[in-house]
Amino acid sequence: MLNSVTVTVNGAPVAVPQGASVAVAMVIAGAPCRTSVSGEPRGPLCGMGICFECRVTINGIPHCRSCQTECAPEMKIRTDE
Amino acid sequence: MVLTQRFDILVIGGGPAGMAAAVRAAECGARVGVVDDNPKLGGQIWRGEPDQQGSNQDGKSEAAQWADRFRRSGAAMLCGIRVFHQPQEGILLAEGTDDLVELRYGKLVLATGARERFLPFPGWTLPNVMGAGGLQAMVKSGLPIRGKRVVVAGTGPLLLAVAAYLRKHGADIPMICEQASWSSLAAFAVSLAGQPRKLMQALQLKRELAGIPFIPSSWPVAAYGLRTLEKVTLALPSRTETIPCDYLACGFHLVPNLELPLLLGCQVDNGYVTVDEFQRTNLPQIFCAGEPTGIGGLELALVGGQIAGLAAANQTSTAQGLFRQQKKARRFAQALDRTFQLRPELQALPQPETIVCRCEDVPYSHLRPHGSWRAAKLQSRCGMGPCQGRICGPATQFLMNWNPDSVRPPVFPARVESLATIAESSEQVCSQAMGGER
């Protein structure tokens, strides 16, 4: 991929286009962003920072809205903590 | 730590309405600041990428022209900042990535924009079921869509714009389902007759969407998949059809973001902030422009924003020159509301087990027994999660006819540290009021 950035999603490397949001990395990785209170997998819905469905842990900071955060090299994204 | 910023005119929202307000006010010499939650200016429509918009005869898109004018105007841009509280009139508190910002203003222009309306149906919580604008935003943020199969469904002109955008980027669109009927769409088309620019846009869209079935009076009834979306069932006028797909782009027109206007005490009538011709709200010093005053799209945003900016800078006679254009844009907004009204059949979409509040996983059957939004919130936790009812509020308003509750701070989830700062400052106020004794 031209001008790509590599991040890790739950430890596995994922290459995304430069400037891509973390939400995009999650969809490319095929990983749900969070597990709902009743145990359902959830992914981005509104794409604009309003629904909070796409929240993930980024570099140790929990509850980050992945659609509002741009991927940076070596960013560590987790959904299991 | 708290950073204080002072502006003659503070604009909340950096979409077209906010940018236009800021430009006109700053060009009059006022000290202007624009605050937006998003990382870039441009709002949801431009998303900080003016180069990707259609160009006009001068070779420069409208977005690029406004972006240039904004840079030259001297208005300050504060992106990635969320307003969550008004401790007293003339002061707003906002939260950045790691600090708290105190915004002091002489006049305020609210240009908070709109969001998509979502309606619950079985399977709507599956990953890869997204808003129509939501999926477009994801693609604009780098999601590869080439070769993906995307069903577009819901209501409103956004569906067509999104379908055209996705197709241009290589998506395969098997069908566009619009819940409005042919007759209301035809009446809408007739109302465009006096608006050559809109007609041109419509014809352009028609070319871009050539070959894609556009089906009025149709809507999604269920989405299926094990861990992610695999297929969607659509109710078509004479049958139902199930289509395998990678994404369902589904939104039911737009609803204005009224949380901040309501928190500040702006009068809201029929779902929109009440404004006069100068975009003034019922509150002195507070103006409002764009979608919160009527879902009218780009034209209403640009003209309303300009009027608000000029009026806030006391340039009322220049503002008056835009009234004719404003009137036309407001008529268009009314026509949109009429055309894309939700049909009652959609109230029957959720099944008893269908989740309505996605934050707290509250199913439809748990909401039915309650008589009001407030009762449902207190007893089922509906609307009590991090989105604060922004998604399920408009849905329950349509499904149950519930009216939204009063808005209380914080209007946006804020960090404990930020809330502690408010608590400290109000403690100081209290102790001062009590003669310094604690």
Image: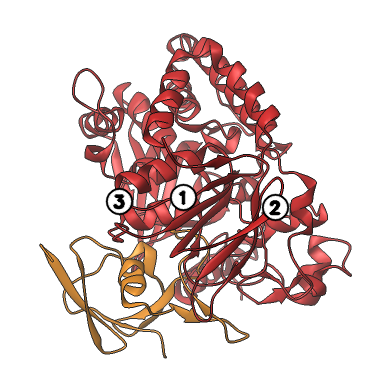
Q: Which residue is mark 1?
A: B133
Count neighbours of disc 3 (C-alpha within 10 A) and say few if under 14, some if 14 to 19, many if 20 or more.
Answer: some
Amino acid type at image mark 2? Arg
* Chain A tint in image: orange
Asked whether the residues under the numbered discs 1 and 3 touch, taking CB atoms below 8 Å apart as contact, a structural biologist would say no
Q: Earlier in the sequence, mark 2 or mark 3?
A: 3
Question: In this view of the protein, which residue sits in the foreground, A69 or B170?
Answer: B170
Amino acid type at image mark 3? Gly
Q: Which residue is mark 3?
A: B170
Residue B369 higher or lower than B217, as above or below: below
Q: Residue placed at 51% from the left, 48% from the top?
A: B175
Kindly identify which chain the residue marked by label 2 belongs to. B
Question: In this view of the protein, which residue sits in the foreground, B359 or B36?
Answer: B359
Asked whether the residues under the numbered discs 2 and 3 touch, taking CB atoms below 8 Å apart as contact, a structural biologist would say no
Mark 2–mark 1 Cα distance, whole angstroms, equals 27 Å
Q: Which residue sits furthest left?
A: A2
SS at mark 3 in the image = loop
Quick check: can you spot residue B189? yes
Amino acid type at image mark 1? Gly
> Viewed as shown, does residue B34 lie left or right of B85?
left
> Of the numbered discs in the image, which one, if any, rests on residue B360?
none
In front: mark 2 or mark 3? 2
Count neighbours of disc 1 (C-alpha within 10 A) and say few if under 14, some if 14 to 19, many if 20 or more.
Answer: many
Kindly identify which chain the residue marked by label 3 belongs to. B
x and y percent of residue B322 in the render? 47, 13
Quarter of the figure with residue B216: top right
Mark 1–mark 3 Cα distance, whole angstroms, equals 17 Å
